[in-house]
Image (cartoon, grey):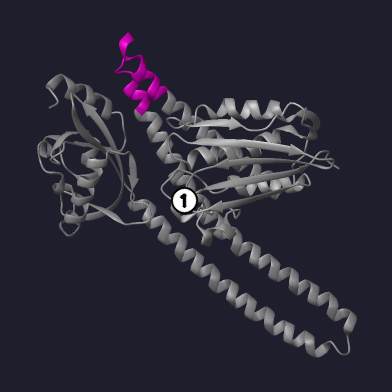
C-alpha cells in the first residue's frame, strides 16, 4: 500500500506529464491520478481516488477491458494498447471518446501497480477521416482524368494511320501523364502513412524519455545506482532509436532526389563489425549477444564504409529487436575474387511466409511484429544503397525459427 509521502512523490512526478496518468492496484482501484485527467476525462483528481477503474470505461466495453487488465496484471509486461483496435474512454459528462493507452507495471513494497497513460486521440481520428476524405476526392479526380485521357487515346488511335509519327509523340505524352498521375497518387498514400507513422513512432519514445527522466530524480542514493542505470539505459535506447529514424528520413529524401554521393575507400570489414557490435550494446535485451563465426582480419574491400556500416547495423538491430532474451546473433563472412558475402543470422520470430514478398517495401511491417516499435523503412533504404553500390541484399526466413540476411557486395566499387 502506498503511504502518503510516496503518493506525494508520484503525484509530483506525474503532474509534469501532459497525458492523463492513472495508477491502479491489483483490484483495479485508482490510487493516484494527475491533473491532466480533468482535461481529458472531466474529473477532479479527488473524485477518482479509490474508485474502480471502470468509472473511466464505457459500460459496453467494461467486461473486455477489465479482463484485459487482469491478464496484463498477471503477466506484467510493458505494453501499448490501442494499435489495430478502437479503444474508448468515458467522460464525466457521459460522452465517449477515442483514446490510446500505455500500460506500465511497477513494484512498490512488494505490491505491483499499473501506471496507465491515457491520450485523447479525437483530433487524430478527425484528421484521419479528413485524410480519407481527401484521398477519396483525389481518387475521383484521378478516375476522371484517366477517363479523359482514355478518350484522347481512342481519338489518337483513329488518326494513327495517317499521322504515325505525330501519333508517337502524343502517345509518349499520354504515357508520361499516366506516370505523373500514378506518382501523385502514390505520393499521397506515402504521405498518409508517413504522418501516421511519425505520430506514433515519435510519441511513444518521447513519452518514455520524459517519464524515465522524471523517475531518475527519485533515485538519489548511492545504493540506487542500478535503478538509475536502468532509466539511463532506457533514455539512451530511445534517443538511439529516434536518431535512427531521423537518419532514415534523410536517406529517403536523398535517395528520392538521387543526391547520394558515395565515398569509396578501402577498409577492413573487421573494423566495421567491431563498431557495429559496440553500438549494439545499448539495444541488447537481457542475455543477448553477438558472436562472430568468421575471421574478418583479412577481408578488405573498396566501398562506401558508412553505407556498409549502416546496412550491417540495421540488420543487427533488427535481429536484436525481433529475437527473445538470452539468444545469440551470429555474423559470418567470406570473400572470393570478386565479391564479399556477409551473413547475419538470428533465431528470432522469423518472417511469416505471406509477408516475405513485401519485406523490402517502404513502411511495410510483418504482421507478427506490429506491436514492436519500428518504421518499416530501414530495409528499404539499405537495399537501395547496396544495389546502388553494385551489390545485393537477400534473406531466408523460417517462421518462429529465425532469419538469415545476406549482403553480397563487390570487393571494389566500379
Badge 1 is on which residue?
A: 400
Magenta range: 212-232
Q: Is residue 225 magenta?
A: yes
* The residue positioned farthest toward the top in the image shown: 222
- What residue sits 36% from the left and 18% below the top? 226
- What residue sits 19% from the left and 44% below the top? 42
**In the rendered view of the protein, which quadrant contains the N terminus?**
top left
Residue 24 percent coordinates (x, y):
18, 37
Of 74 and 119, nearer the camera is 74
Q: Is residue 169 left or right of residue 208?
A: right
- Residue 90 can be seen in this image: no
Q: Is residue 170 magenta?
A: no
| The image quarter in which residue 326 lies | top left
- Residue 367 can be seen in this image: yes
- What residue sits 57% from the left and 37% below the top? 316
Classify 10 Å Cα crowding around label 1: few (below 14), some (14-19), many (20 and above).
Answer: some
Q: Is residue 245 left or right of residue 212?
A: right
Determine the main secondary structure of the stretch shown in magenta.
Answer: helix
Residue 47 percent coordinates (x, y):
10, 39
Local secondary structure at mark 1: loop
Of 158 and 404, nearer the camera is 404
Residue 210 percent coordinates (x, y):
38, 29
**In the rendered view of the protein, which quadrant contains the C terminus?**
top right
Of 183 and 335, nearer the camera is 335
| The image quarter in which residue 227 lies | top left
Amino acid at each position: 500500500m502506498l503511504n502518503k509521502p510516496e503518493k506525494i512523490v508520484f503525484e509530483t512526478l506525474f503532474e509534469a506529464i501532459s497525458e492523463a496518468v492513472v495508477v491502479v492496484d491489483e483490484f483495479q482501484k485508482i490510487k493516484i491520478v494527475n491533473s491532466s485527467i480533468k482535461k481529458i476525462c472531466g474529473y477532479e483528481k479527488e473524485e477518482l481516488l479509490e474508485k474502480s477503474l471502470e468509472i473511466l470505461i464505457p459500460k459496453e466495453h467494461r467486461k473486455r477491458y477489465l479482463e484485459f487488465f487482469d491478464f496484463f496484471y498477471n503477466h506484467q509486461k510493458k505494453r501499448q494498447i490501442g494499435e489495430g483496435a478502437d479503444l474508448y474512454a468515458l467522460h464525466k459528462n457521459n460522452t465517449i471518446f477515442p483514446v490510446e493507452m500505455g500500460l506500465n507495471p511497477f513494484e512498490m513494497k512488494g505490491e505491483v501497480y499499473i501506471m496507465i497513460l491515457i491520450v485523447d486521440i479525437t483530433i487524430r481520428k478527425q484528421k484521419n477521416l479528413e485524410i480519407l476524405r481527401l484521398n477519396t476526392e483525389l481518387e475521383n479526380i484521378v478516375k476522371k482524368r484517366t477517363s479523359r485521357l482514355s478518350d484522347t487515346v481512342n481519338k489518337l488511335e483513329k488518326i494513327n494511320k495517317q499521322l504515325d509519327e505525330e501519333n508517337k509523340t502524343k502517345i509518349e505524352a499520354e504515357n508520361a501523364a499516366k506516370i505523373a498521375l500514378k506518382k501523385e497518387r502514390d505520393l499521397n498514400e506515402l504521405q498518409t502513412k508517413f504522418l501516421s507513422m511519425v505520430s506514433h513512432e515519435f510519441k511513444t519514445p518521447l513519452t518514455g524519455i520524459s517519464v524515465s527522466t522524471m523517475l531518475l530524480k527519485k533515485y538519489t542514493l548511492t545504493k540506487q545506482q542500478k535503478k538509475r542505470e536502468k532509466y539511463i539505459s532506457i533514455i539512451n535506447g530511445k534517443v538511439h532509436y529516434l536518431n535512427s529514424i531521423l537518419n532514415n528520413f534523410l536517406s529517403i529524401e536523398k535517395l528520392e532526389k538521387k543526391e547520394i554521393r558515395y565515398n569509396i575507400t578501402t577498409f577492413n570489414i573487421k573494423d566495421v563489425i567491431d563498431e557495429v557490435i559496440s553500438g549494439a550494446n545499448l539495444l541488447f535485451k537481457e542475455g543477448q549477444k553477438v558472436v562472430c563465426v568468421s575471421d574478418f582480419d583479412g577481408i578488405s574491400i573498396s566501398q562506401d564504409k558508412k553505407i556498409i556500416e549502416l546496412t550491417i547495423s540495421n540488420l543487427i538491430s533488427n535481429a536484436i529487436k525481433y529475437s527473445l532474451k538470452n539468444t545469440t546473433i551470429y555474423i559470418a563472412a567470406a570473400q572470393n575474387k570478386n565479391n564479399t558475402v556477409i551473413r547475419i543470422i538470428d533465431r528470432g520470430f522469423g518472417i511469416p511466409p505471406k509477408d516475405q514478398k513485401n519485406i523490402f517495401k517502404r513502411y511495410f511491417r510483418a504482421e507478427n511484429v506490429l506491436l514492436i516499435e519500428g518504421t518499416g523503412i530501414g530495409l528499404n533504404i539499405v537495399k537501395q544503397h547496396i544495389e546502388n553500390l553494385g551489390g545485393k541484399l537477400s534473406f531466408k526466413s523460417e517462421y518462429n525459427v529465425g532469419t538469415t540476411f545476406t549482403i553480397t557486395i563487390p570487393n571494389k566499387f566500379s
